[in-house]
């Protein structure tokens, strides 16, 4: 970890507050990729009403939410497991499959590697020559043949890149040929514009080795509440369920999940905002600052500074102004110049851009 490095994950405001002396509530946080609109109002009022229910244990079978979610997705409830965030679903997938080897394409979400190692698997990482770009068919086929479980981010964190339907199908076919499991992490898929969105979900009955992981914490701005789910063939879901701690998903999260399912307008409004602001941020960073931006489709952008700057220094300078960004220097496959920013609302994005321009105007070195 570099001398200016603040934290291992985005959104660690407590550590950032300690380092920079900025109160937790005062941060303008571009390090965590959460819906800038915050949770929907109806969700908050539902949670308030639900507080009286915390005197009871939650339903360990998660029946109401599973049923409602199954209807929404057009699948049977046996294909679903509700988890304490997508992160728990990932851990359950690793435990259910018990892989000896786990494959990843760097750069990727660090939890794939952490979880694999935590549960005793050896990690094989594959990294292209152009770090911001996704692996080609040869790299994908070779890695799938050599591991028991492959994690892919779709969109990938921190690049924001997505796979085409053709690429997803090719990978799924290959995993079936090889008997390898494929975990497709769709935690950020909700933010992708509908015309670009691709998923293996409608074809899942052909692929017994594919597990889709989804999160409700990003779109509905509830990372502190924790809620996610896995979709896979019933025998895989059953094996995952056997590894789950009883009552792992609390009553408030289950109720919140039901409320989220009726928030189509909020999801659409969010997508429009993200689409517009992603393009705005990307254009300004590329054109006004001349820095390189990875063409991601999610609610965050990976940026590469010129060699005269480092992301750690930039993080330090912005931190003093109460703006938190995510240095990506520690991601295998990326460089000291890479950092990631969340896509937020226009006024906040303007504030970030102004601060970035000030840093650039200092002529290379941040203070
Ligand atoms: C790519 C990716 N997948 C999954 C998660 C975890 O999501 P959840 O909050 O639902 O556990 C994160 C969290 O940052 C993430 O970046």
Image: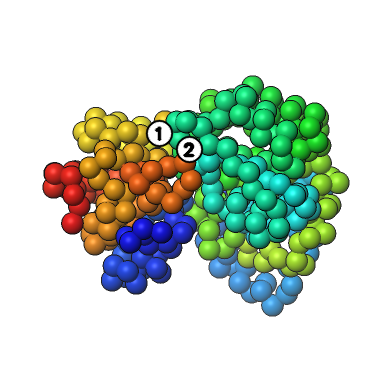
Residue 268 visible, this angle: no
Compared to residue 75, the image places residue 260 above or below, namely below
The residue at the point 61 percent across, 29 percent down is 139
Q: Mark 1 points at which residue?
A: 294
Give x and y (percent) for residue 348. Answer: 29, 49
Q: What's the distance in space between the residues labelled 1 and 2, CA to CA?
A: 8 Å
Give x and y (percent) for residue 304. Answer: 33, 39
Q: Name the residue under label 2.
A: 160
The residue at the point 26 percent across, 38 percent down is 306
Residue 315 visible, this angle: yes
Query: Between residues 260 and 209, which one lies in front from this camera angle?
Result: 209
| Quarter holding residue 82 | bottom right
| Quarter holding residue 217 | bottom right
Q: How crowded is mark 2: few (under 14 residues within 10 Å), some or many (20 or more)?
A: many
Give x and y (percent) for residue 66. Answer: 75, 51
Query: Between residues 343 and 285, which one lies in front from this camera angle?
Result: 285
């Amino acid at each position: 970890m570099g001398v200016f490095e603040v934290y291992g994950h985005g959104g660690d405001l407590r550590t950032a507050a300690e380092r920079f002396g900025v109160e937790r509530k005062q941060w303008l946080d571009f390090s965590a990729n959460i819906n800038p609109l915050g949770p929907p109002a109806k969700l908050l009022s539902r949670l308030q009403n639900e507080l009286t229910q915390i005197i009871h244990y939650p339903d360990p079978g998660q029946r109401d939410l599973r049923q409602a979610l199954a209807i929404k997705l057009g699948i049977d409830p046996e294909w679903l497991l509700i988890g304490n965030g997508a992160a728990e679903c990932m851990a359950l997938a690793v435990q259910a499959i018990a892989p000896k080897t786990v494959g990843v394409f760097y750069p990727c979400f660090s939890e794939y590697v952490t979880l694999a190692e935590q549960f005793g698997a050896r990690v094989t990482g594959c990294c292209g020559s152009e770090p911001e770009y996704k692996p080609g068919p040869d790299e994908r086929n070779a890695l799938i043949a050599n591991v028991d479980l492959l994690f892919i981010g779709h969109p990938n964190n921190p690049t924001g890149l997505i796979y085409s339907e053709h690429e997803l199908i090719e990978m799924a076919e290959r995993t079936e040929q090889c008997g390898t499991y494929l975990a497709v992490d769709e935690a950020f898929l909700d933010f992708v514009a509908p015309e670009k969105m691709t998923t293996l979900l409608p074809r899942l009955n052909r692929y017994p080795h594919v597990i889709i992981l989804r999160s409700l914490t990003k779109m509905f701005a509830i990372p502190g509440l924790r809620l996610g789910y896995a979709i896979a063939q019933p025998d895989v879901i059953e094996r995952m369920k056997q590894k789950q701690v009883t009552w792992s998903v609390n009553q408030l999260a289950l109720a919140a999940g039901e409320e989220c399912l009726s928030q189509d307008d909020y999801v659409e409004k969010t997508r429009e905002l993200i689409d517009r602001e992603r393009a705005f941020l990307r254009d300004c960073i590329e054109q006004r600052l001349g820095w390189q931006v990875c063409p991601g489709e999610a609610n965050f952008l990976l940026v590469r500074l010129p060699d005269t700057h480092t992301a750690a220094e930039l993080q330090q300078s912005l931190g003093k102004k109460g703006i938190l960004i995510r240095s990506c220097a520690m991601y295998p496959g990326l460089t000291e110049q890479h950092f990631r920013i969340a896509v937020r609302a226009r006024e906040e994005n303007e504030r970030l851009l102004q601060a970035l321009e000030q840093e650039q105007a200092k002529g290379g070195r941040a203070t």
